[in-house]
Image: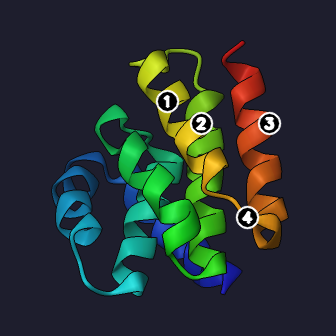
Amino acid sequence: MELLLAEMRMLGLRVDEAHERRRSLMASGSSGQRLVAIAILQVKPAHDAFLWLAERVATEPPFVGFQAALALLHAAKQEDLEQPEQLRVALIMARRSCGPELVEHAYLLDEALQYLV
């Protein structure tokens, strides 16, 4: 699964193609296609997707939700971060959605919040 995810992330390196496809993948009814969108966002964070990622953390299957939390962490680590306050809101929203079964997700979100202090 990790190898497949790495290939999905490579889509994010093709900037024009990834930006066009990301929106349609985000709107897909398939969790697999949404995972591709998340993988792209791990490589190329986009402030217009922060809230969408936050929603994915607890609503997707655990592996996909974890990847969404990881995408938010990658965004928080960006030196030239656009819309840091929007990211902070998304991180808090995602963190509040984590129940005890999502402790790993919560850990990533807590770490991401530390980058915005």
Say which label, 3 or 1, has the lower sequence index. Answer: 1
Q: Earlier in the sequence, mark 3 or mark 2?
A: 2
What's the amino acid at mark 4?
Answer: Gly
Residue 35: image x %, image y %? 45, 73
Q: CA distance from mark 3 to mark 1?
A: 15 Å
Q: Which mark is residue 92?
A: 2
Please, what secondary structure does the residue beneath circle 1 have? helix
Residue 43: x, y in percent?
50, 48
Question: Left or right: where does residue 22 sit relative to residue 49?
Answer: left
Q: In this rendered view, identify the residue nearer to me: 109 or 12.
A: 109
State the mark number for residue 89.
Answer: 1
Mark earlier in primary sequence (4, 2): 2
The residue depicted at 76 percent of the width and 48 percent of the height is 108
Secondary structure category for the residue under label 3: helix
Against 59, residue 96 (above or below) is: above
Residue picked out by circle 4: 99
Q: Which residue is mark 3?
A: 111
Q: Around disc 4, counting alpha carbons within 10 Å, would you say few (fewer than 14), some (14 to 19), or many (20 or more)? A: few
State the image quarter where residue 20 is shown. Answer: bottom left
Q: Nearer the viewer, mark 3 or mark 1?
A: 1
Give amino acid for label 2.
Ile
In the image, what residue occupies the spot 69% across and 79% down?
2
Q: CA distance from mark 1 to mark 4?
A: 18 Å
Q: Position of residue 33 (x, y in %)?
A: 34, 80
| Cα–Cα gap, marks 3 and 4 | 17 Å
Image quadrant containing the C terminus = top right
Name the amino acid type tagged 3.
Glu
In the structure shown, which secondary structural element does the residue marked by tag 4 occupy?
A: loop
Q: Nearer the viewer, residue 4 or 28?
A: 28
Instruction: Judge the density around disc 2: few (<14), some (14-19), many (≥20) Cα neighbours within 10 Å.
Output: some
Q: Who's the residue at 29% across and 38% down the image?
A: 48
